[in-house]
């Protein structure tokens, strides 16, 4: 069994002005928000969860993106409500948020 039940990587890459990247869509702020939400959820989430920054995940055209391991689930998001839904549905209740899946875009 791995140490983390869920390990989230937020692409927070910042490219040159004019180039598409996740951080142009507020990725760092959303990562910080997610980290707060995970901490606030506390014991509602089974097992340890880690929320990390990541460099470019090479999915800029789908961004901003998060990948959740060990499930290898890729999400995109628009706002805090999307992050809330990922935390509540995926991390707390174990249900993938189909509407936010990168491959469904």
Image (cartoon, rainbow, N blue to C red):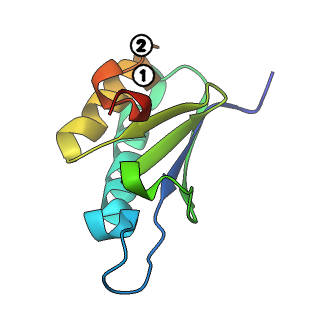
Q: Earlier in the sequence, mark 2 or mark 1?
A: 1
Tag on residue 62?
Answer: none
Q: Residue at x 49, y 52 (%)?
A: 59
Farthest-out residue, bottom: 17
Q: Position of residue 18 (x, y in %)?
A: 30, 82
On the rendered image, what quadrant is the N terminus found in? Answer: top right
Q: Residue at x 49, y 35 (%)?
A: 74
Q: Is residue 88 above or below residue 19?
A: above
Q: Is residue 2 or residue 105 the one in the foreground?
A: 105
Residues packed near mark 2 inside 10 Å, few (<14), some (14 to 19) or many (20 plus): few
Q: Is residue 56 or residue 42 the one in the foreground?
A: 56
Q: Is residue 93 or residue 36 the one in the foreground?
A: 93
Farthest-out residue, right: 1
Q: Position of residue 92 (x, y in %)?
A: 42, 20
Q: Is residue 103 above or below residue 97?
A: below
Q: Is residue 49 or residue 94 the one in the foreground?
A: 94
- The residue that disc 2 covers is 95
On the rendered image, what quadrant is the C terminus found in? Answer: top left
Q: In the rendered view, does 28 fall on the left or right side of 1? A: left
Q: In the rendered view, does 9 fall on the left or right side of 76? A: right
Callout 2–callout 1 Cβ contact below 8 Å: yes
* Local SS, label 1: helix
Q: Position of residue 61 (x, y in %)?
A: 39, 54
Report the Cα–Cα distance between label 2 and label 1: 5 Å
Q: In the rendered view, does 53 fall on the left or right side of 34? A: right
* Local SS, label 2: loop
Q: Residue at x 61, y 30 (%)?
A: 72
How many numbered dots are placed on residues in this image?
2
- The residue that disc 1 covers is 90
């Amino acid at each position: 069994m791995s140490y983390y039940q869920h390990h989230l990587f937020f692409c927070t890459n910042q490219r040159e002005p004019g180039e598409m990247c996740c951080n142009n869509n507020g990725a760092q702020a959303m990562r910080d928000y997610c980290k707060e939400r995970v901490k606030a959820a506390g014991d509602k989430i089974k097992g340890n969860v880690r929320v990390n920054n990541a460099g470019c995940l090479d999915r800029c055209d789908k961004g901003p993106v998060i990948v959740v391991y060990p499930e290898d689930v890729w999400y995109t998001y628009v706002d805090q409500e999307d992050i809330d839904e990922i935390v509540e549905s995926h991390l707390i209740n174990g249900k993938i948020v189909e509407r936010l899946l990168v491959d469904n875009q």
